[in-house]
Amino acid sequence: MNNPRIGRLVLGAAALILGFAVVYTATRNKTPAAPPEAAASASAADPLAALEQAAQNAPSDPAAWRALGSGLFNAGRFAEAASAYEKAANLAPSLAVVWSSLGEARVMASKSDPMPAEALSAFRKAAGIDPKDPRARYFLAVNRDLTGDHEGAITDWLALLSDTPPGAPWEADLRRTIEQVGKIHKIEVASRLAAVRQPAAPAGQGPSADMPLAAQGIPGPTTADLKAAAAIPPSQQRQMAETMVARLESKFAADPKNVDGWIMLMRSRITLGQPDKASAALKSAIAANPAQTARIRQEAGVLGVQ
């Protein structure tokens, strides 16, 4: 795929379908807490500046640079995030998550190349340290797709799916990515998806089969997500969450049979304090899926949506 524009479109159709679910929800919640200096300033007018100051005050602390990198990334300052992650990687070269975070920041900072060589190098470094790093595995598969090895990409995504605990926040989006890339390139994936046997979640962890989906760990701007983005000023936090939910809404409007997606959207709207929009999502979900009205209303009831 030599045309950078086509490559960027494919990245949008594949990597960014899963981007927030895998890269943000699955791995940003592993970002270390900010150092005490930054935590003490969390309520300051500019918490991102507090993270920058904390990193300057502790230049040999990789956790400080990781926290700064995460804050800058969440604020959309990707090139600066990459610089912060580079410092963290130099200080803690044995941490796979730092290298995969660096690779992701480099991808997002690129204005033309959907997979810059330096980003690919970082993902490979992460995978060399921890072959199970989900972000590195995902983006390395994206690279295979971008270079024309669509079958190889699907095989790698299926392997990632097989290692994904059932009900993990990114599971549904990963399946859809595999389905969509398979459809685009006329590769049969239905039987292969059906054959995937995912590992059971450890006892006491993961979603319960008896728990309504609305109460499970589906992706969306939950309180935990917003806390993970505490380095962003409140107004930017709100804007980030609303932008993400607007994208979700557009996605599910185009795929109205995705009941789980409508439940995700309702939960997101409640998290944002938008009960009217949550109710509108409920009505749209029922209109598109009348046979599942009972289940949709049950899930909505868990959220307090009427």
Image (cartoon, rainbow, N blue to C red):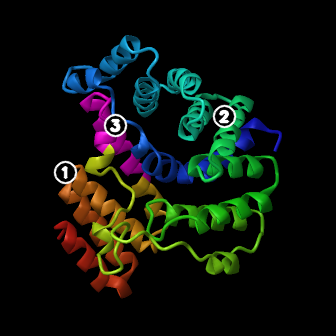
Between 1 and 133, the residue placed more toward the observer is 133
Q: Are marks 2 and 1 in contact (CB under 8 Å)?
A: no
Q: Quadrant of residue 296?
A: bottom left
> Disc 2 versus disc 1: distance between alpha carbons?
39 Å
- First to last magenta residue range: 226-247
The reply to whether the magenta stretch includes residue 231 is yes
Q: Is residue 282 visible?
A: yes
Q: Quadrant of residue 195?
A: bottom right
Between 34 and 169, the residue placed more toward the observer is 34
Label 3 crowding class (10 Å Cα cut-off): few <14, some 14-19, many 20+?
A: many
The residue where tag 2 is placed is 122
**In the displayed structure image, the side of residue 264 where residue 299 appears, left or right:** left
Q: Pinpoint residue 229: horizontal percent, then vertical percent.
A: 34, 37
The residue where tag 1 is placed is 273
Say which label, 3 or 2, has the lower sequence index: 2
Say which label, 2 or 1, has the lower sequence index: 2
Q: Pinpoint residue 3: horizontal percent, then vertical percent.
A: 80, 38
> Disc 3 versus disc 2: distance between alpha carbons?
23 Å
**Residue beneath the point at 69% across and 61% down:** 181
